[in-house]
């Protein structure tokens, strides 16, 4: 079988680095170009020395990528920039996998409300497929525009979607308290990710229905429940490099055992979901550097006690580049786990 020719826009990003490491060892993929605006004409291993001997490609300026023949283009660019740069490739019929938020929301008005600018190509929003394989595998197989979900979003939707699909009417409210490692903020310099700010610290941010992942979570839960769903979502920054732990409070008349059985049944054949016992709670160290999502259910048992779902993922893998490769595998008819089990 011929290898899938891959391009990566924004290859100097943290998610780009992860993609290169995954795809350089993928049995059916070949990276044919990588781009950077700031480091064009340098080698990617000048930016990330650990890639030396693994992938030594020269970084192209973004506008030079259009002259390279490829089958699939990943974008690791910030939102807005990503859609702008992807449009010509979409128009040429190249299958794109966007790690930014640009194609995740179906409603351009919601996009404008949360991202504070008009969507550059709203005509493509309907066609884009939300890239959560556990929910949209069939649509992903034929997708030409793949919207890879947000990292927090993945950790929250995976335990909740089977519940909203089946017992959604019995769920009154949900609160997600999520904690992320600092790589979730990206490589671009920001005060919050300076060592002295983040180290030996833990702080909440964007609380009170203000974090940009909120509409994505609500969109997908509403689709599953077939009614509007709202969530209270409180993200926190943890002084670790990578990983997300989400603690999700679900007010429902159902027991934790029933919730666990529903979710376990829905994911019985999923290669990257691992159910844990309440006595062996998911933890970030158990999923770091893997594409797994670990989850467990506890609590409940009375009118006022919510069921509690705990989930853990690696934000850069199941929350970004690993899930993107999982989606690529489905889109190109490969084994879904190719290049992801190590
Ligand atoms: N970090 C995560 O855990 C995570 C998880 C899920 C999704 N995402 C999403 O995935 C995307 C990449 O995230 P990241 O955290 O890996 O990013 P990052 O480390 O902050 O890097 C972003 C990259 O975009 C490039 N860039 C920035 N502005 C640009 C512009 N105006 N034109 C062209 N290129 C530009 C920069 O490359 P040069 O300076 O080399 O040009 C930079 O390497 C984002 O949309 C993010 O929201 C991130």
Image (tube, rainbow, N blue to C red):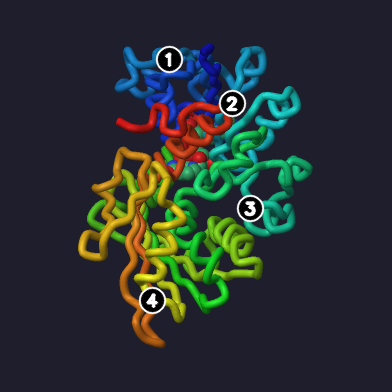
Q: Residues within 10 Å of mark 2 (few under 14, many from 20)?
A: many
Placement of 69 over or under 39, stated as above or below: above
Q: Secondary structure at mark 1?
A: loop
Q: Secondary structure at mark 2?
A: strand
* Mark 2 or 1, closer to the camera: 2
- The answer for how far apart the CA atoms under marks 2 and 4 are is 44 Å
Identify the mark nearer the N-term, 3 or 1.
1
Question: Residue 27: x and y, percent?
Answer: 42, 19
Which residue is at the front of the view, 290 or 183? Answer: 290
Disc 2 CB within 8 Å of nearest ligand 1 atom = no
User: Of the numbered discs in the image, which one, if any, rests on residue 115?
Assistant: 3
Residue found at x 31% / y 38%: 289
Identify the mark nearer the N-term, 3 or 2.
2
Mark 4 touches mark 1? (CB < 8 Å): no
* Mark 4 or 1, closer to the camera: 4
Q: How many marks on residues?
A: 4
Placement of 205 over or under 284, stated as above or below: below
Question: Residue 340: x and y, percent?
Answer: 38, 32
């Amino acid at each position: 079988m011929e290898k899938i020719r891959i391009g990566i826009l924004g290859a100097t990003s943290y998610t780009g680095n992860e993609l290169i490491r995954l795809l350089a060892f993928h049995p059916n993929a070949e990276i044919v170009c990588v781009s950077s605006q700031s480091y064009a004409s340098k080698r990617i291993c000048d930016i990330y020395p650990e890639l030396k001997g693994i992938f030594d490609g020269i970084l192209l300026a973004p506008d030079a990528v259009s002259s390279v023949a490829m089958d699939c283009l990943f974008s690791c660019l910030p939102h807005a920039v990503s859609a702008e740069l992807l449009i010509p490739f979409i128009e040429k019929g190249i299958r794109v996998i966007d790690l930014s938020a640009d194609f995740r929301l179906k409603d351009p008005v919601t996009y404008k409300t949360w991202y504070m600018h008009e969507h550059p190509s709203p005509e493509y929003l309907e066609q884009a497929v939300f890239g959560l394989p556990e929910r949209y595998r069939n649509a992903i197989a034929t997708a030409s525009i793949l919207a890879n979900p947000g990292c927090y979003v993945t950790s929250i939707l995976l335990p909740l979607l089977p519940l909203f699909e089946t017992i959604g009417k019995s769920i009154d409210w949900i609160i997600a308290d999520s904690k992320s490692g600092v790589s979730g903020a990206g490589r671009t310099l920001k005060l919050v990710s300076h060592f002295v700010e983040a180290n030996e610290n833990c702080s909440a941010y964007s609380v009170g229905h203000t974090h940009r992942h909120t509409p994505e979570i609500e969109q997908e839960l509403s689709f599953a429940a077939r009614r509007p769903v709202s969530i209270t979502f409180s993200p926190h920054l943890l002084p670790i490099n990578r990983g997300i732990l989400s603690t999700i409070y679900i007010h429902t008349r159902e027991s934790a055992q029933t919730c666990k059985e529903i979710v376990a049944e829905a994911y019985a054949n999923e290669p990257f979901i691992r159910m844990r016992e309440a006595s062996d709670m998911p933890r970030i160290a158990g999923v770091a550097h893997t594409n797994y999502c670990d989850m467990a259910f506890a609590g409940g048992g009375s009118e006022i006690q919510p069921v509690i779902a705990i989930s853990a993922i690696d934000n850069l893998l199941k929350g970004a580049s690993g899930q993107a490769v999982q989606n690529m595998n489905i889109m190109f008819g490969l084994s879904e786990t190719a290049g992801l089990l190590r």
